[in-house]
């Protein structure tokens, strides 16, 4: 049923007004705007900026990145929906597309029908890291300390009810521990606080944790992906640390408001597919642990269906709220 809804949305994009359809002939003839739902410096922003810079070459127009944070990503979503649906404004979003419908009441739009999936930009493995003077040096020691001191260890994630929060909640459930969740607007904000020692730990992307770890002010304990990642070969996975099957990564992707012409949607997806494989993008994103994707619209829509089921189950079973 959900696949049918996605396909109807994609088909509906083709039913643009004759004026917009005519305008596709010379698209793009002015700068394109990516409204990013997250703070500058975080994983989603870094991946969006990296791939957008490369896409500009093939599209022949600049892509302007506009960070619009707040409202659990609804401010960016609303800004996209309120913009002309002419193929010049796109939304860069993540798990909020999946979780906001079960977390927020009285949303002014339905994510599933208001947006068309365009392309997944990237997947980011996440990492549990602790501040420099935190006593635990392994994940097992962290769990033992959390059991001895329930509801005292603070862990920052970006943002509330994002993929990092879901990963933390799933880890707490499986490990049988109770932590103090500290939500942040973006990964860079959480990284700054662990560098300052204001929080005990973070669960953020490998990209966001680089500065604290490289400065010696934080230590990685485990990554959330199913396998170890090349950029952190000595850091074990949560799965191999006693929790087989654990695999919850962050991700981001491009969405268009339903009604956006098909031509620009397909051009953006095609350009992203090429840029995701480019040497320049990989040179920047591989060291950060990013897995660049650049999927086609229908493949992205199908992948989102599976992710939606996982996200909704964790939100409900863990009782996650935005408060």
Image (cartoon, rainbow, N blue to C red):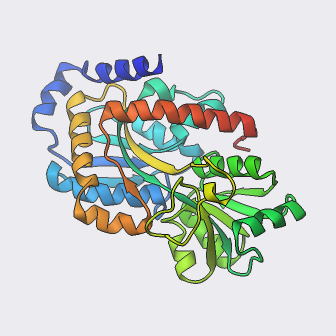
Q: Is residue 250 above or below residue 95?
A: below
Given residues 55 and 201, the one toward you in this image is 201
> Visible in this render: residue 137?
yes
Q: Quadrant of the C terminus?
A: top right
Q: Name the residue furthest right.
A: 148
Given residues 224 and 10, the one toward you in this image is 224
Q: How far from the left and from the top, in percent, is residue 233? A: 49, 70
Q: How far from the left and from the top, in percent, is residue 62? A: 22, 54
Q: Residue at x 77, y 69 (%)?
A: 141
Q: How far from the left and from the top, in percent, is residue 218? A: 63, 76
Q: Is residue 84 above or below residue 29?
A: above
Q: How far from the left and from the top, in percent, is residue 306? A: 50, 32
Given residues 250 and 221, the one toward you in this image is 221
Q: Residue at x 87, y 59 (%)?
A: 150
177 relative position to 161: left or right: right
Q: Name the residue furthest left.
A: 25
Given residues 268 and 207, the one toward you in this image is 207
Q: Residue at x 58, y 29 (%)?
A: 107
Badge count: 0
248 relative position to 315: left or right: left
Q: Residue at x 68, y 75 (%)?
A: 131
Q: Name the residue furthest bottom.
A: 216
> Visible in this render: residue 37?
no
């Amino acid at each position: 049923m959900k696949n049918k809804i996605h396909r109807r949305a994609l088909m509906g994009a083709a039913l643009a007004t004759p004026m917009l359809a005519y305008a596709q002939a010379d698209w793009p003839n002015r700068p394109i705007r990516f409204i990013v739902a997250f703070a500058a410096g975080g994983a989603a922003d870094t991946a969006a900026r990296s791939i957008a810079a490369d896409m500009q070459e093939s599209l022949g127009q600049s892509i302007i990145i506009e960070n619009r944070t707040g409202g659990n990503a609804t401010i960016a979503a609303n800004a996209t929906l309120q913009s002309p649906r002419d193929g010049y404004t796109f939304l860069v979003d993540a798990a909020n597309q999946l979780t906001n419908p079960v977390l927020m009441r009285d949303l002014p739009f339905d994510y599933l029908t208001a947006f068309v999936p365009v392309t997944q930009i990237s997947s980011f493995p996440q990492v549990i890291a602790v501040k420099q003077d935190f006593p635990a040096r392994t994940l097992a020691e962290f769990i033992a300390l959390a059991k001895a001191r329930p509801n005292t260890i603070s862990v920052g994630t970006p943002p509330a009810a994002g993929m990092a929060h879901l990963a933390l909640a799933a880890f707490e459930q499986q490990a049988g521990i109770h932590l103090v969740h500290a939500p942040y607007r973006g990964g860079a904000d959480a990284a700054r606080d662990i560098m300052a020692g204001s929080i005990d730990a973070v669960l953020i992307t490998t990209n966001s944790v680089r500065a604290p770890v490289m400065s010696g002010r934080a230590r990685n304990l485990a990554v959330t992906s199913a396998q170890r990642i090349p950029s952190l070969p000595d850091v074990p996975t949560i799965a191999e640390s006693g929790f087989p099957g654990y695999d919850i990564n962050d991700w981001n992707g491009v969405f268009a408001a339903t009604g956006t012409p098909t031509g620009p949607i397909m051009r953006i997806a095609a350009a992203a597919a090429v840029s995701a494989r480019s040497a320049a993008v990989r040179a920047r994103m591989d060291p950060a642990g990013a897995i660049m994707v650049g999927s086609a619209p229908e493949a992205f829509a199908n992948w989102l269906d599976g992710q939606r089921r996982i996200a909704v189950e964790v939100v409900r079973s863990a009782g996650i709220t935005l408060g």
